[in-house]
Amino acid sequence: MSQPPPPSAGRELANPPSDGISNLRFSNTSDHLLVSSWDKSVRLYDVSTNSLKGEFLHGGAVLDCCFHDDSSGFSVGSDNKVRRIVFNVGKEDVLGTHEKPVRCVEYSYAAGQVITGSWDKTVKCWDPRGASGPERTQVGTYVQPERVYSLSLVGNRLVVATAGRHVNIYDLRNMSQPEQRRESSLKYQTRCVRSYPNGTGYALSSVEGRVAMEFFDLSEAAQAKKYAFKCHRKSEAGRDIVYPVNAIAFHPIYGTFATGGCDGFVNIWDGNNKKRLYQYSKYPSSIAALSFSRDGQLLAVASSYTFEEGEKSHEPEAIFVRNVNEIEVKPKPKAYPTPAA
Amino acid sequence: MIRSSTEQFSRIETTCGLLLRQLQEIWSEMGENEEEKDAALADIEKECLLVYKRKVEEASRCKANLLKEIALGRAEIAGIGSSMGGDEIHSNGRVGENLKEELENVSVQLEELRRKKAERMNRFKEVIDELLNLSFQLGDSTDHLKKFGGEESDLSLHKLEELRRQLAQLQDEKSKRLDEVERLLETLKLLCSVLGEDFKDLIRGIHPSLVDSNTRDVSRSTLDKLDMMIENLRMVKLQRMQKVQDLAVSLLELWNLLDTPAEEQKTFHNVTCSIALSESEITEANILSVASIKNVEDEVIRLSKLKITKIKEVILRKKLELEEISRKVHMAPQVLKSENFSIEAIESGVKDPEQLLEQIDSEIAKVKEEASSRKEILEKVEKWMTACEEESWLEEYNRDDNRYNAGRGAHLTLKRAEKARILVNKLPGMVEVLTAKVNAWEDERGHAFLYDGVRVLSMLEQHKTLWEEKEFEKQRQRDMKKLHGQLITEQEALYGSKPSPGKSGKKPLRTALPSSAMNRKLSLGGAMLQSSKPTLNTKKTTYYDQNAPSRRESTIPNPSGRRNSELPGRLRAKNVPSSGKAVMNKGRSPMLRKPLSPVTSNILNSPEDHKDAYTTKSSPKTNEDNRRTAVPISAPTTPAASVAMSEATTPFTPASTAVKKRLDKEEGVEYSFEEVRAGFC
């Protein structure tokens, strides 16, 4: 049942969580990795020494986490609470609560606010400096058409992807109403949405082995560039087996991106030239999350069953951190064909 | 009169004595008694003693004061001396002879020392003030200095030296920092000029004093901020440089592709030159400014659009070329009919033009290759077709009764008939060879050889069957003639005369009708009329049944064995559904039918043939389609098929039942994996 991961999968971190991994993130300032898990814990790893620096327990499964700076971070989960954790001290404050489990959290450096999305169909903004009770930290509540499945921030833009394939795009400076209301161009349930680091658009993945590349600019010229492609599929007997694409991560320098699916593969894509640059060898279990380090030299891969087939026995959870070679992520502009005479 | 104290003392004694003597004289005059004199004298003594005592006390008090002052003075001297370093005190050389002199000495010395101390303190104050000033400028902490200002415990030269050294250090530090600030500002200026940013604005943002060179702030934080800003700008420069270099590369490629004239290229010359430069080498002003980069970007976009338009033109041209080639070799490639290549699709650019170009190029190559392989066979087919035409003309000619009549051009037709006969004789052989060749070609190629959409082999087949039928027909006619001849001789034997040959004899010839031929997938154009002579017919029928395998039961029970357009509806009705493929040419005179042309159109009408003609060609195409839409995962460099928002509906199996359930119920509520796992639904 348990197969050893291929030797080139990267370093496996010691003390992984004991139940599914919901998300993992590298810090913007160092090689610390924050991992949230269904075993109700948030773990902080120092990747360079492969050591567990801290473990913080919550009241329920932790569904997402993010860094504030090297000394603190935020985590949210199925106990409906939004927490701030100060790592060294091991202190936790509750910034606020939603009415249903909170699925995503992001910290906006531009606005200095924490943004959370929940299955209670709202997105809320919190000011982490509010020391006194939760009532004072909440900055705003914004109702969404459906339960929030994924969020992404870039600059002053927030992209919210919900059930029912809705996508709302907000400007953080004016959250009273969405800047754009869209519908996902893919026909199946949205899994993950991530904005491009250059802030011109976002990538959206679905459960049907497809990723759509979209752009914020509504002009015809920009919208002509949008496209979708199929990925994470296996061809058998003339039919394709499709796998959900759970995670997307953009390389901070090159702008290329990695996708991870329930087929256990991680692919690196060049969005501008529409090519696949690389595929890593298969991981033992579904890819639940991906994150590039701040300089793009490392890629953390969470290999953890994501419950796509319900309750069943599965490989144990593992986190792999692999070194990224330039050839795997550097874009390759197309070589033009010689024009026909 | 100045008298010394001793003189005065003796004078007082003398005066007192005189006064006493006077007193005694007075008393003796008065006659005072001894007691009263004694008492008075005792009084005088007592009073005098008191006065003396008082004076003595006063004097000793003064002396004590003096001593105290001297002691105080000395103590202060010692204090100042120690605080100033101890070498200021000259030893008390002059020891005064009496205390007042001593005090004098001490005060003088003290005065001196105080003055010196004040002087020293001034010097200290100067130095400390400057230190404070500098420390503040440098942003150092000044606590210890302020503390120092209050105390006066150490005013020694040593300490002064120390402070002076510190001062020198700080001044040094300040000048170093000024230099560094200067240097950083220079670098910043250069970076700003390259990037097209406003230098003055930026440095004003860091610290207002930086703008003016005289009063620059040199605190550590300013320096750090300058460092960081330089770092930031350098990053920006790197980024922009990379971007510009990438753009320049694209620009060069596009110029190469589009053969841009040199004047147009010149405006962007500086950009393209910068491709090879490293970060430090890019120093031209505004070369990396936002506006400049945008210009280059816009140019690249414009050229890309141009390229796409050109590609579209090329595609259209190639499409025409493809059509031309196909037409010449009587091919009808499927790809031309596909919607990807319709004019609208090409114009609108829905599919990626470069991909289309590749496709069309490969199509053209394929078609050319196929065309060349078909050439030989095509020639033969042409020849065969002309032969068939000639054959039919010949038949017609043969039927023409007037053919031997001399008239204008009769000799030409005769010649033509001659040639035609030869050709017709060659025909079977031609057909054989052609069939063999087509078969070989089809085996090699793996698909049917089509001529204008029709399978050549089937054409040949039909022709062959027709030809065989005709042969049979001829044979039968010959046999019939023989029989007829026999009959006539018999008749003659019976009746004694021959019936006239000729016209009546012709009818039987024409009535031979192979019943099974009706059931083949042929038009009835070749069908012949049936005679009404029952005896002959029965004979015919039996004869024919021996030789021709009848494919349909309906023909065998038919006693009259007749079939043609005018047959009773019963039989026709039977035949039509069973054959399904036979098309009746009602009312069409069989005489005028040319062997091949109607057959061709009928073949097109018959669904089976239609299927035959197209199945083999289409199946490789669908396989190809399937292969193309399922992106293989193993090869790392496979380009991802880019489908514009209209998604290809590849048949697929969802990987998990959960997904399948979700995909099936479009109307019901959907849940994500996490919701299911959390028991949220």
Image (cartoon, helix red, strand yellow):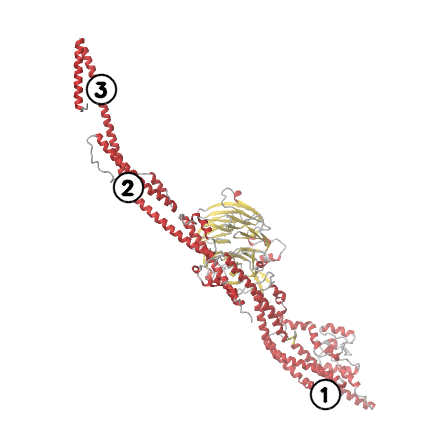
Q: Determine whether, in the image, residue B206 is placed left or right of residue A186.
A: left
| In the rendered image, the vertical position of residue B123 relative to residue B496, given as above or below | above
Give, as a three-letter code, the residue at label 2.
Ser
Q: Nearer the viewer, residue A222 or B637?
A: A222
The Cα–Cα distance between marks 2 and 3, rounded to whole angstroms, is 53 Å
Q: Determine whether, in the image, residue B443 is placed left or right of residue B155.
A: right
Give, as a three-letter code, the residue at label 1.
His
- The answer to whether residue A265 is seen in the rendering is no
For disc 2, the marked residue is B156
| In the rendered image, the vertical position of residue B16 relative to residue B578, given as above or below | above
Give, as a three-letter code, the residue at label 3.
Val
Q: In the rendered structure, are the residues bearing label 1 and label 3 in contact, judged by CB atoms less than 8 Å apart?
A: no
Chain letter of the residue carrying label 1: B
- Counting residues from the start of the chain, the first of labels 1 and 3 encountered is 3
**Residue at the right extreme?**
B495
Q: Nearer the viewer, residue B287 or A319?
A: B287
For disc 3, the marked residue is B51
Chain letter of the residue carrying label 2: B
Circle 2 Cα neighbour tier, 10 Å, few/some/many (<14 / 14–19 / ≥20): many
Circle 1 Cα neighbour tier, 10 Å, few/some/many (<14 / 14–19 / ≥20): few
The Cα–Cα distance between marks 1 and 3, rounded to whole angstroms, is 199 Å
Q: Which mark is residue B679?
A: none
Circle 3 Cα neighbour tier, 10 Å, few/some/many (<14 / 14–19 / ≥20): few
- The answer to whether residue B192 is seen in the rendering is yes
Secondary structure under tag 1 reads helix
Quadrant in which the C terminus of chain A appears: bottom right
Q: How many marks?
A: 3
- Counting residues from the start of the chain, the first of labels 2 and 3 encountered is 3
For disc 1, the marked residue is B411
